[in-house]
């Protein structure tokens, strides 16, 4: 019998990189991101981050997408992307509230179309253990 399709398989559509706020870099992540881009932290802050104290909001372009988002759906700072981006779609909200899971499923084509909330939570646990 063929194995079931995975609960989550990113399609690199980039939809989750649209600026709805809440994507921030802390000081350590900013240092890593600057190193990945080969620029100083000062330059990183000037070009990509909101003013203020850390964690800093990552700015969005006029198209509403995070400034690190690329046209092919990949992230320019993939190796240093913030924890929230690494954890997606297994975030606290969708893991705790079923309606938030349904919203995430509507927004993210990488979540299998017939995926149920229980299976989603199991997949999150397996990922956490691996
Ligand atoms: S919305 Fe889902 S499928 Fe699209 S890039 Fe984000 S994680 Fe991947
Ligand atoms: S940091 Fe990368 S993964 Fe996170 S929202 Fe921006 S482009 Fe997307």
Image (tube, rainbow, N blue to C red):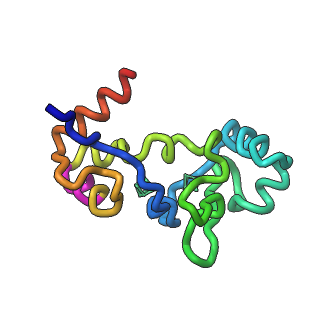
Q: Residue at x 19, y 48 (%)?
A: 115
* Relative depth, front residue between 40 and 106: 106
Our reading of the magenta stretch's main secondary structure is: helix
- x%, y% of residue 101? 25, 52
Q: Is residue 102 magenta?
A: yes
- 8 to the left or right of 44: left
Provide residue 104's location: percent of width, then percent of height.
31, 56
Please state the total of marks drawn on the protein image. Answer: 0
Residue 11's quadrant in the figure? bottom left
Q: Quadrant of the C terminus?
A: top left
Residue at image position (53%, 59%) is: 73
Q: What is the residue that sits farthest to the bottom in this orientation? A: 62
Specify the segment rendered in magenta. Answer: 98-103
In-image side of 103 versus 81 (left or right): left
Rendering coords of residue 47 (x, y %): 77, 62
On the image, which quarter does residue 121 sit in? top left
- How far across and down, in percent of the image, does residue 24 sit? 59, 51
Residue for point 84% across, 49% down: 39
Give me the residue at 77% from left, 55% from top. Answer: 45
């Amino acid at each position: 019998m063929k194995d079931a399709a995975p609960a989550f398989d990113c399609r690199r559509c980039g939809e989750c990189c649209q600026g709805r706020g809440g994507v921030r870099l802390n000081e350590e992540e900013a240092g890593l991101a600057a190193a990945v881009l080969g620029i100083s932290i000062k330059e990183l802050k000037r070009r990509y981050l909101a003013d203020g104290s850390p964690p800093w909001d990552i700015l969005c372009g006029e198209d509403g997408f995070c400034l690190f988002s690329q046209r092919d759906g990949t992230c320019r700072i993939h190796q240093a992307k913030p924890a929230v981006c690494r954890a997606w779609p297994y975030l606290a909200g969708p893991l705790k509230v079923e309606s938030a899971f349904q919203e995430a499923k509507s927004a993210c084509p990488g979540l299998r179309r017939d995926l149920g909330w229980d299976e989603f939570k199991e997949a999150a646990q397996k990922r956490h253990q691996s």
